[in-house]
Image (tube, grey):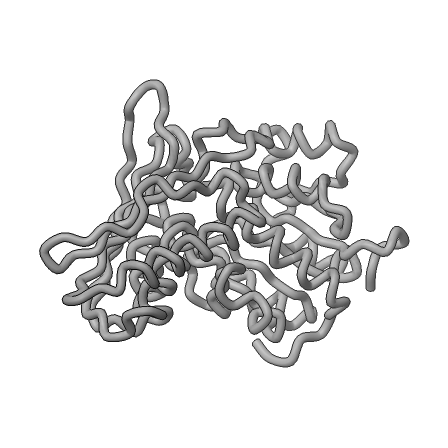
Amino acid sequence: MPASNGKLRVAILGSGNIGTDLLIKVQRSPVLDCTLFIGRNLNSRGMAKAASLGVKVSDRSIDAIARDPDCCDLVFDATSALDHAYHWPILRNLGKLAIDMTPSRIGSMCFPAINLDDCLNHRNINLVTCGGQASVPLAHAISSVHPELTYVEVVSSIASRSAGPATRLNIDEYVETTSHALSTFTNAPRTKAILILNPAEPSINMQTTVFALIAKPHMDALTAAVRDTVRAIQAYVPGYELLVPPTWEDGKLVTTVKVRGRGDYLPRYAGNLDIITSAGVAVAEAFARQGRREPGHA
């Protein structure tokens, strides 16, 4: 049920960088209410931030929800792919919506710029990866003009400082899940995802480049499709910027974007985290505005 203020009640599971940035964004939302912020260490920076904002906190991990099922309607899981595999059966049995911020590949893959409406029919929404959120919509736009493309490659470069323990723990899952999403949303028979942790000082902004093999590109249509996609993403990620418009040479199409964060909890260079938390809030707000509490299927 909604909170007394009419907002959708959400819990955030995971008190690291992603969970805490989510909290700031949820606090700003006109339709979401964070009723519980959950971690494992009451002395962590994320817990301290939540407490300073007057948000109820718990160090009991998933048990906090299992022991008080009425605490929320939707749960953001900002832990790890391995942990989400354990959390989801519990959340499913409790009838909760879940927005999975990890590359677990358990729920329905969601990119708000591509398939938001369809995602609202599912109970477990997977936001794939930060590189996936930056690149898959672009690759999808390219494939909508050239469905015959045979290969898509994505290279994302992020500031090493923006990659916390959970991100580093999930590197293998990141590569596999991003590549799987590229295949699913482009139908390309071959895909590859590469992640670069750049230690440069000062820290760099996230940059993502999409490569696609296309023999005879329709450049006007490709450019229009990519620009439309960029505008759609900018509706929920204002710092998403097209750096290199579609460019073709020797059978290879290339386009590059930069992602700069809002600076809510994390530095503005951490656009890789900002894009996935912004996507998560966009999905949760869509659930809230539809008033859905019991979607049709997992």
What residue do we see at 75% from left, 31% from top? 53
**Quadrant of the rendered image containing residue 208:** top left
- In the foreground, 83 or 23: 23
What residue do we see at 57% from left, 48% from top? 236
Q: Residue furthest left?
A: 250
**Residue 40 seen by the camera:** no
| Residue 23 on image: x %, y % | 65, 41
Q: Residue furthest bottom?
A: 296
- In the foreground, 110 or 176: 110
Q: Residue furthest top?
A: 202
Where's the N terminus, which quadrant?
bottom right
What residue do we see at 38% from left, 59% from top? 136
What residue do we see at 37% from left, 65% from top? 140
| Residue 83 on image: x %, y % | 48, 56
Left or right? Give the position of 136 relative to 29: left
Left or right? Give the position of 65 relative to 130: right
**Quadrant of the rendered image containing residue 223:** bottom left
Q: Residue furthest right?
A: 4
Q: Is residue 169 above or below residue 111?
A: above
Q: Is residue 121 above or below residue 243?
A: below
Where's the C terminus, which quadrant?
bottom right
The tally of labels here is 0
Left or right? Give the position of 102 relative to 7: left
| Residue 277 on image: x %, y % | 55, 46
- In the foreground, 152 or 40: 152
**Residue 17 seen by the camera:** yes
Left or right? Give the position of 33 relative to 40: right
| Residue 133 on image: x %, y % | 43, 53
